[in-house]
Amino acid sequence: MTVRSYDIELIEKYIDNSINDLELLEFKEKLRGSPEFREAVEFQIKLIANIEALEKKRLKEELTLMFADIPPEKKSDSDSVKKWFLVAAGVLVLLTATMIWRLQALNNEALFDKYYEPFPAKGIVRGDIPDTEIDQIMYTYSAGEYTDVIAMIENQMSRDVYFEGQKLYLGNAYLQTSKMEKAVQSFESIPLESRYRMDGKWYLALAFLKTGDEQSAKKILQGISEENSIYRSSAKKLLEDLN
């Protein structure tokens, strides 16, 4: 797939947060399905970062020159000039910090979309009619009806009814509905002895990445990369992308 001018416009809208819901869906689909589009997003983010760095340098130089042009007696006698300079410098720092945070958030969002795939529903064959409560949950989950999945599993838990992998599926449903804190709690509560333990670690790392907690994500990914599992290679690649 070739990145067209429309794609660039879509990327720019995403970066400046002017994208609408339909465009956001299209953006995420392209991000998942097109390596060329992902490369264009990464390039655009780096380009903006470089432009902002140059603009910060230029503004800092201008402020320094403007302050240097003020006569010495003005510098010592005028509190207003000092205050103006301090305010201008403070604004520069704030703008820089805000832009760095924004670019970091965009990069984390792009990486999450690149690596995240919902954990597959178990035991579901197309055309089957679900005949148990767990089958119904899996059927609903595979259909992408995550809000209903949350309601069904939370109802089970309120009745002290549990099944293997319940917290993993619940965590994925929370991720899909942007309930990030609950997703983290769900993945963290998967027992160490569970056969879904490593799956839970992988999705926990992605949840931390989505929330912007890079350090926690990296710590978990480092642990995954040192264990023999299906996530080992992906964890190493994601760590490289984060560094």
Image (cartoon, rainbow, N blue to C red):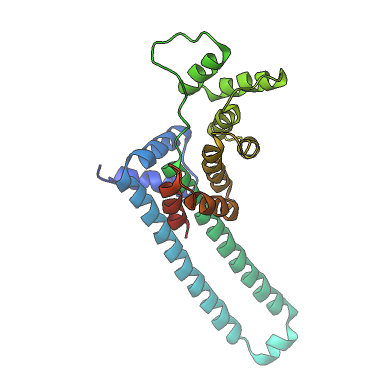
Residue 110 can be seen in this image: no
Q: Quadrant of the N terminus?
A: top left
Asked whether, in this view, residue 235 is left or right of residue 67, the answer is: left
Residue at (38, 39) in percent of width and height: 32
Asked whether, in this view, residue 229 is left or right of residue 223, the answer is: left
Does 52 appear above or below 70? above
| Extreme residue in the bottom direction | 72
Residue 56 can be seen in this image: yes
Residue in front for this viewpoint, 37 or 198 = 198
User: Residue 114 placed where, x, y %?
Assistant: 41, 44
User: Residue 94 placed where, x, y %?
Assistant: 62, 63
Residue 174, quarter of picture: top right
Residue in front for this viewpoint, 233 or 44 = 233
User: Residue 210 placed where, x, y %?
Assistant: 54, 45
Residue in front for this viewpoint, 230 or 79 = 230
Asked whether, in this view, residue 36 is left or right of residue 18, the answer is: left
Does 106 appear above or below 137? below
| Extreme residue in the left direction | 2
Residue 60, quarter of picture: bottom right
